[in-house]
Structure formats: structure tokens, C-alpha cells
Amino acid sequence: MSFDPFRQLTSRTLVLARDNIDTDQIIPARFLTTTSREGLGKNAFYDWRYDASGAPKNDSPFDHVDLSERRILIGGANFGCGSSREHAPWSLIDLGFRAVISSEIADIFKSNSLKNGLLPVEVNSEAHAQLLKTPDSQVSIDLETQTVTLPDGTETPFVTEPFARRCLLDGVDPLGHLLNQSDAISSYEAARA
Amino acid sequence: MEPLSLFEKLWRRHIVVDETEDAPAVLFIDLHLIHEVTSPQAFDVLAERGIGVRRPDLTIGTLDHSTPTLPPGPDGEWPYATAQAKQQVETLIENCREHGIELFGLGDERRGIVHVIGPELGLTQPGKTIVCGDSHTSTHGAFGALAFGIGTTEVGHVLAAQSVLQRKPKSMRVIFDGLPPKGAGAKDLALAMIAQIGADGGRGYAIEYAGEAITNLSMEARMTLCNLSIEAGARSGMVAPDQTTIDWVKGRQYAPKGADWDKAVEDWLSLASDPGASFDREVHVDVSHLAPMITYGVSPDAAAPIDTTAPAPTSDTERRAAEYMGFEADKPFTDMSVDKVFIGSCTNSRLSDLREAAAILKGRKINEGVTALIVPGSEQVRRDAEAENLHNIFIEAGAEWREPGCSMCIGMNGDTGAPGELVVSTSNRNFVGRQGTGVRTVLASPATAAASAVVGRIADPRQFMNEH
Ligand code: SF4
């Protein structure tokens, strides 16, 4: 999947202050019968945003929020746990998000997000607590320096797996990288045959 | 020689290109299982880029998630939940046909839930690397394979290159101390472990399960345990191959035969962690007093012994969970009334699970207020269960006996609970809405689910076990 390189991002945040936000919350399974990657944003956090009749819920963190201004999602600990569905990052990207910040992000979700240009950012618990406590605040993420500028203006570091970081910064295509190793794969196959 | 862990041995065997600071390792994949939900977009990428499938011979497809569990009508049409579900199934059929991938489609006697059929057919073998666009791929680790779930982009990578780019995970050994008392099985073992280490406790780790309690487990039970590794946040969980493993694999359709078999066995038995092998983390779980476990929250680590009460919530997240689930602090779990019971899923839909449920349902009736759905994990499981007459025990008790598939584990095929209903389920996720909007899921073993169906409330299965 192609996406714009990611360097810096500044945006107001949308805060979902719950731990263990699982992939069934991000995109309920009944929306997974699609065979496309597109258009999943309308179903993202569907049961948080809409009631059974499809009307927007007024106690949801999404209520009255102009999502077009929110490109950074703040989640509680262990964000993205659960299934391997890549529909989760697809749907968040379709909703306009380009980064998720938490104190902990689940492995498969993290890996899936990186492959689609959604930057998973894990910060220390102090920084995380500040982000959770100050919804709607302005936050900047710099992937080159791997720092987040928090609402109070202080900076906090994060680490991105170096290869994924290079893919995001320079638009390197992981599948291309893998296909470039086909000779090595062939030798491996031959040695085992 | 440096003592190596099972994981380390599996990892080293499959390195095509070593990892460097700049790039992850290229890891060769011996078996790629695909299903209808997480593969279509991967095939699209192949088509967009004009790439073929590198090793269709190492790729196997099955239909499980969106497939109906009710039989075809008189017109031969399967009762799909939606036109989109049907289209998803047809897309996989078409993709497999185009790329020469073997598919166990509707009507095929080998079809079933991807993590049930892999082992059953002998495709899953010790020493292999196994991936699938499905997080419960950890199940196959029960055989001493390195098996983990991947996303759709990676499904594309494996289709194109039979390899994945991976950073080496850290290793963890979970040692179960003691032997579980009667009435507590693999599901209870797993829930107790998850409750202890947390839903994120295994994040970043490949787990090896060890201890006498594990050596004593049947293959089916080991699969249940490894299946739930991901609910502790670990992408893979494994058990060292031993005679139990060998006996189980022997003679299965895709298992090695003749001289190859003898060679394979020798190799497989050499995979166990060497004495003195090191792990990044070691955890002990005492199971000597283990009771049947259930979950009371909306994350699998909210699990507790069935004969206790729900703890008082201590955080906002827990308060919301308690409100959603309706468990009150200090009220016995067994006071909670049950609307539905689901026995099935890749966690607990094998023959042994169905026997466990049947032992309790035999000669009893399901409580009036409860509907029970029993869904075998595969066509093979269904045939075996029917050969033992288990289906009649279920039907006579008042349960529904269905076609194999994921069914109410994920509710993609239309099998769901209704808003507000409390479902005691042998599946793996109690997430909000997992089994249908507003459905409250309580995870439990097949015995506990069956006992709850009979009583109409969450019920301790041990009350039905002491009679014989
Ligand atoms: S049974 Fe449930 S967890 Fe297992 S593969 Fe199917 S949907 Fe996933």
C-alpha cells in the first residue's frame, strides 16, 4: 500500500482514555466481510460512536468532534490488543488519523500500523498520563528525531523499529525489500530441499 | 555447546537473512494458512504489482469465518449472513483457483476452522514456522512449531516471498507448578496464567509453556493453551514436542511417512529446550489448587475462579467493564443468570472439548431460559463426534448442533447474541461486542459452559463431575 512519507505531524488529539482498547472496538467484526481496504473509516469505533439505530451517541468521545482536525489518537494502555485484522489501522487511517500514542501498543497492531503509514508511538507513563489528561490539546510528533512534544511543551522520546522508520521516512517499500532477497530465499529453499 | 531454547532452535533454522540494526531478519515460512477474511486485500496487492504466489505448495486455504453454520437449503444455496459474506467466500475460492492453492472449501470433508484443520490434517508439524492472517495462529505452537499471526500486508509478503520480515521477539518461559485438580483443564490453566501476567504480560515475547502440568496435557489441551497465548499479548506460545506430540501427528494425511517419518521423529524430539537454556523472562504459575476459571470483565485477564466473587473495580476502565458486564462486587459469580451458551471456536471445538461438554449434558436438559449452540471445529470433528453419538446427546439436551466454522466466536456469519444477553462461551475473547453488539461474554471451559447451560446460571462443573 502506498502512502505519503511521514516526518513531522502536529495536530490536536482525540483521547480515548481506556485501557485494552481491542481491535473489536476499533472495527467490529461484522464489518470485516469487506474485500477492500477502502472506506472503513465510517465503521471505525462504530459501537462507540453510534447506537443500535445508527444515531450518534452523545456520550461518546467522538461526539461533536470534528475528526478532520484530529490526526493523533491517544489511547489507554495495551492499545490495539486482540486480532490481527489490518482493518483496524485501515479504518483509523480512513478516519484521518496518522498516529496513535499510548504507553503500550499491542504487537500485531503496531506492525500492521507501520505498514500502512499509521505511526504507533509508545511513550513513558508520565507523558502518557499527561496526554490522557489533556484532551483536545496540540501535540507534535517528529519521526526524524523520534520525539513527541507534549501539551505542556516538554519533549518526550520514543523509539520506532529502525527499518519501519526508514520505510516511513523515505518511502521504502518493505515488499520490495523482501523481493530483493529472493536469491537468498532460493538458496535457503535449495539447501533444505 | 551453547544450550538453546526451543524457540531459539526454531528461529535459527528459519533465518534466510540475519537481522541487522537496519533491517529485520528474513524468516522463511514452512506453512501459510489463509482464510477468507484477511487474504483478499493481500491478493489484490499481488495483482496490482503483477506478482505470483511463490510457494502455492506451502499455502493452504480454508473457509471458516464468514461461512454459515446452517446447512445449505433445498436449492443447494448456503445461507450466508450477507451478500458481502458470500462474496468474500467466493473471492477466496477464485484467488486459490487462480494461484493453484489447495482450498478446503464448502462441502470438502477437510474444511474447518483454520487452527483446527492444520493440526488435524498433519499439516502442522513440530519444527515448522507457521503463519496465518489470524492472531490465534499461536495454537499451532502446541506442536513445537513457531507459529504466529500476521496482518494482511504480511500475508501478501508471504504469498510473494514465502518469508516475513521479523525482529526476533524476546523469550519467556511460563512454568506451571503442580498438577491441576480434577475439574480444571487447559482453558482454566490458560485463564489463570492470563489473569496473573495480564493481557499485555506476553507482549513482545515468544512463550514456551513448561512444567509437569504441561507434559501431562493431551495435544488438544496444549492447543487450547497455546491458542490463548495471544490473549496474554504474546504472538506465539509453544510446547516442546514429546511422545504425546509424535503419537498425535503419526498417520495424519500430510504427516511424513516411512523412512521420512523416522527421520522427522528423531529431529522433532531434538527440539526441546536444552537444559540450561536461557529465557528473557521466567514466570511460575501455581496450578495445584486451580479451580474452573471464568472471566467477569471485557478483557481476558479479568478472570477468576468460578467459586469466588467479582472484585471491586479499581480503575475507570474496570468500572466501565463492571457496568457493562453487570457483575457486582462480592456477589457470587454463580448467581449470574445465563442467556446463551456457545461451545466452539479454535480454542475449544475439538473432539475432546465436545466430549467434555457431552459428559455433563448427557441425560440432562438445558435450562429453559438458555439457548445453546454447539459448533464443531471442523468436518472431521463433526464426523468423529457423530460417530460417538455426541450430537444426539446435545440435541436431546436441547442444544443446537451446527456445521463447522468460527460461528459465535466472532459473529461474522450471523451467529450472534442479542444486545444485553449474557453468553457463556468457550471462545477466546470477551471484548465488548465481540459476539454481537451489546453482548456480554463470559469465557469458560466446555465443562463450565455445559454446566451453565444446564443450571441457567454460571455454574461450577464440578458439581456434575463427582457423581461417577
Ligand atoms: S474461531 Fe474465533 S478466534 Fe478462532 S479463528 Fe475463528 S474467529 Fe478467530
Image (cartoon, coloured by chain):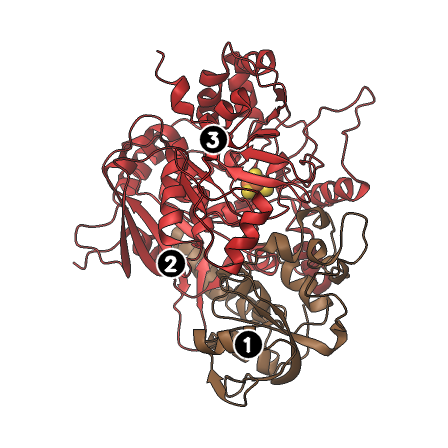
Q: Mark 2 or mark 3, which has the lower sequence index?
A: 2
The residue type indicated by label 3 comes to Thr
Neighbourhood count class around disc 2 (C-alpha, 10 Å): few under 14, some 14–19, many 20 upward:
many
| Disc 1 to disc 2, C-alpha distance | 27 Å
Q: Which residue is disc 2 drawn over?
A: B205
Neighbourhood count class around disc 1 (C-alpha, 10 Å): few under 14, some 14–19, many 20 upward:
many
Q: Is mark 3 within 8 Å of ligand 1?
A: no
Please state which of the two labelled residues, at mark 2 or mark 3, is closer to the viewer: 3
**Label 2: chain letter:** B
Closer-to-camera residue (B350/A29) = A29
Is there a contact, CB below 8 Å, between mark 1 and mark 2?
A: no
**Label 3: chain letter:** B
Reply above or below: B22 against B103: below
**Label 1: chain letter:** A
Chain B in the picture: what colour?
Answer: red
Q: Which residue is disc 1 drawn over?
A: A131
Reply above or below: B367 against B137: above
Q: Is mark 1 within 8 Å of ligand 1?
A: no
| Chain with brown colouring | A
User: Whereabouts is ligand 1, in terms of quadrant?
Assistant: top right
Q: Is residue B42 visible?
A: yes
| Disc 2 to disc 3, C-alpha distance | 35 Å
| Disc 3 to disc 1, C-alpha distance | 40 Å
Q: Which residue is disc 3 drawn over?
A: B334
